[in-house]
Image (tube, coloured by chain):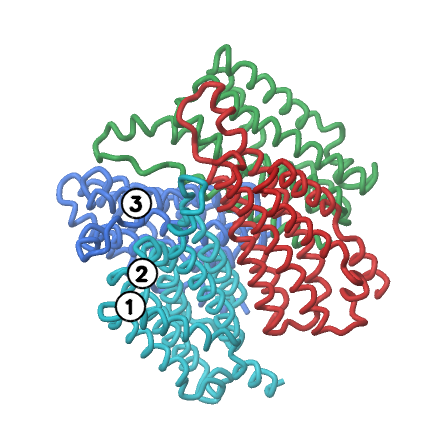
Chain colours: A red, B cyan, C blue, D green
Amino acid sequence: MNKSRLEAFSDGVLAIIITIMVLELKIPHGDDWTVFQRLGPKFVSYIISFIYVAIYWNNHHHMIQTVKHVTGSILWANTHLLFWLSLVPFVTAWAGENHFSELPMAAYSFVLLMAAIAYFLLSKVIVNVHGKDSVLSTAIGSDWKGILSIAGYALAVAFAFILKEISLFIIVAIAVAWLIPDRRIERKLKEKE
Amino acid sequence: MNKSRLEAFSDGVLAIIITIMVLELKIPHGDDWTVFQRLGPKFVSYIISFIYVAIYWNNHHHMIQTVKHVTGSILWANTHLLFWLSLVPFVTAWAGENHFSELPMAAYSFVLLMAAIAYFLLSKVIVNVHGKDSVLSTAIGSDWKGILSIAGYALAVAFAFILKEISLFIIVAIAVAWLIPDRRIERKLKEKE
Amino acid sequence: MNKSRLEAFSDGVLAIIITIMVLELKIPHGDDWTVFQRLGPKFVSYIISFIYVAIYWNNHHHMIQTVKHVTGSILWANTHLLFWLSLVPFVTAWAGENHFSELPMAAYSFVLLMAAIAYFLLSKVIVNVHGKDSVLSTAIGSDWKGILSIAGYALAVAFAFILKEISLFIIVAIAVAWLIPDRRIERKLKEKE
Amino acid sequence: MNKSRLEAFSDGVLAIIITIMVLELKIPHGDDWTVFQRLGPKFVSYIISFIYVAIYWNNHHHMIQTVKHVTGSILWANTHLLFWLSLVPFVTAWAGENHFSELPMAAYSFVLLMAAIAYFLLSKVIVNVHGKDSVLSTAIGSDWKGILSIAGYALAVAFAFILKEISLFIIVAIAVAWLIPDRRIERKLKEKE
């Protein structure tokens, strides 16, 4: 299995996910200012999801850079991650259309939770294949950032039924925390050179 | 004809197929739990199809790796395969929307059957071009796995009208059998090195 | 301007065009055999268009292979071609939905006509940039195949209002004539090596 | 961060944006000539947007060619640009459906304004990273072309509420001005060789 094709396929899927979300912004009937009021929550969910997919693309790229041997397990762990990310346009539109009401908010948080778990599993699989002394392993260490994110999304799922504003806050906060590319990997890659 | 462009085009088409399927998961009206009940069969068909396209991407990659000369016949055998796979989002949505009722279940099985035949034909064309002693030829041998799959899908088409649960079972079973990348090709490629 | 990016962008656009056409095959209501009767013309137009886009991808690839310098004129001639091809999903769906009635049949033929003209112009621009002795120039010569196709599509537009079966026949006939990759270019490329 | 992946991802997103716009050209009911009358404004907006995305793809390519180090800031400035361009299909369809009425016309101009600002910011970030003597910096100089375009789009937003024909004229005029690839960069790149 060739690493560059894994990258190309993942890039393709992520580029399509981030772009087709706009198709769920159904063209509004009417052309007056109330349109923006009605579209408001949809745009908010669109912006958040756009940023999330961009973050995943960016961090995914850094992670795959450390891969030397693509095994069947890495391949399927990667497909598993793409599966959950492929559901982002769906929950984005559902949450936006229902003004982030309870269940759609929980579903949105749940998909982010599962994507984070899939990302965490993918990192574990890569470390398993490449050993404890590999670039990724020493770079992410115990990966508290990944684990905290998972815990955060789990909280967001729960709070969707109690106080959805907190769910939204958690999701935005985690996005901000990940906006900065994972320099740990970049640093370790440089050290190796 | 350049092999890397054949790969790039096929990758592109497969990445788009696997991603646009989510657009057929129409955003449900309402935001209560009955939504999941209504969406249930659609999600099941979505998951199965997602796995199928991922399997095809993976195995297609292995097969094309053995190609040395891209001829017109390989090109059109490949386009023929992409054609049937391009119909997967359509039958996925139709089967999901009708809770896997008779005809949609048969259509779903039929598209998988034709894709499997197209895949089989593509392998035959590649072997014809590259000779009996080529990597692919010695790797797949008589290709009982491909032939059994074709027979399985044919059965699934027939059972759709008798006992559709069996059709679904066959389709899932074949997917599981193919989940593991075709190590035969990888092994032969390594031997050659 | 880098030739490989021109190829990558064109490949991407063509891969998306060929794949999103399936989204216009709206999921039918109902699950009985009358569905196929209703979908019949749509499938026919889908198959024809799928083959056409595949032909364009294949021949476009051969033509671009002869390009050495990408100029602004080549770039915009290429974008012009992609524009007309981007309308293929639209006229495909419109013609299919109206059972190839007069106006949609004429529109379908017209888009193919304009794409053929755009392809012809692109070849002329490439020859202009690379000279009379270039690979493409000696390979296509006076390009009677391209000119005959243009004439054929023009006839198909006219016949759409008289006897639409002839339009459909012309379109299918030209597709068959182009199914075989343009060996003239391949041969000339080999001679040069 | 690898430059070729940044290019590949941007190319992918732009190729998808330019192609999915056709999905917003909803298939018309009916097959008589009035269809074209109804579709008229949609086609006009489709053509303008197609040209705009092609221009962005072309100029983006030239700009990225000058990049040597991809930093986090370049990455996010690029994502910011893609975000605004991703909204082009939405405002295209909205403006087309409402025959370029006030608010949709203003929204269309506003998205082009924000994309132009994002493009300007991206160029500034690249210059900051690469220094005052870098290729891009000496090529674009004070970038009066970028600044004038931004001013033009701002005017187009305002005129949408006064005399929308002027907005449309400004947008078309700026497109024409950018149709020619930015030779300044090409020239400077050649000088360096």
Task: Inspect the image, locate mark 2, and give the three-letter code of the amino acid beneath it.
Answer: Phe
Identify the residue at horizontal 39%, vertical 80% (top origin): B146
SS under mark 2: loop
Asked whether residue C55 is in view, the answer is no
Q: CA distance from mark 2 to mark 1?
A: 8 Å
Residue at the left extreme of this rendering: C163
Q: Are marks 2 and 1 on the same chain?
A: yes
Q: 10 Å neighbourhood of mark 3: few (<14), some, or many (≥20)?
A: many
- State which mark lies toward you, 3 or 1: 1
Q: CA distance from mark 3 to mark 1?
A: 32 Å
SS under mark 3: helix
Q: Chain of mark 2?
A: B
Task: Inspect the image, locate mark 1, and give the three-letter code of the amino acid beneath it.
Answer: Lys
Identify the residue at horizontal 37%, vertical 49% (top origin): C23
Q: 10 Å neighbourhood of mark 1: few (<14), some, or many (≥20)?
A: many
SS under mark 1: helix
Q: Are marks 2 and 1 in contact (CB under 8 Å)?
A: yes
What residue did someone put label 3 on? C93
Please state the horizontal and vertical placement of residue B74, each as a whole percent of the image: 41, 71
What residue did someone put label 2 on? B100
Q: Chain of mark 1?
A: B
Please state the horizontal and vertical placement of residue C113, each as a whole percent of the image: 31, 44
Please state the horizontal and vertical placement of residue C79, each as a whole percent of the image: 48, 43
What residue did someone put label 1 on? B164
Please state the horizontal and vertical placement of residue A84, each as a whole percent of the image: 55, 55
Residue A138, numbered circle: none
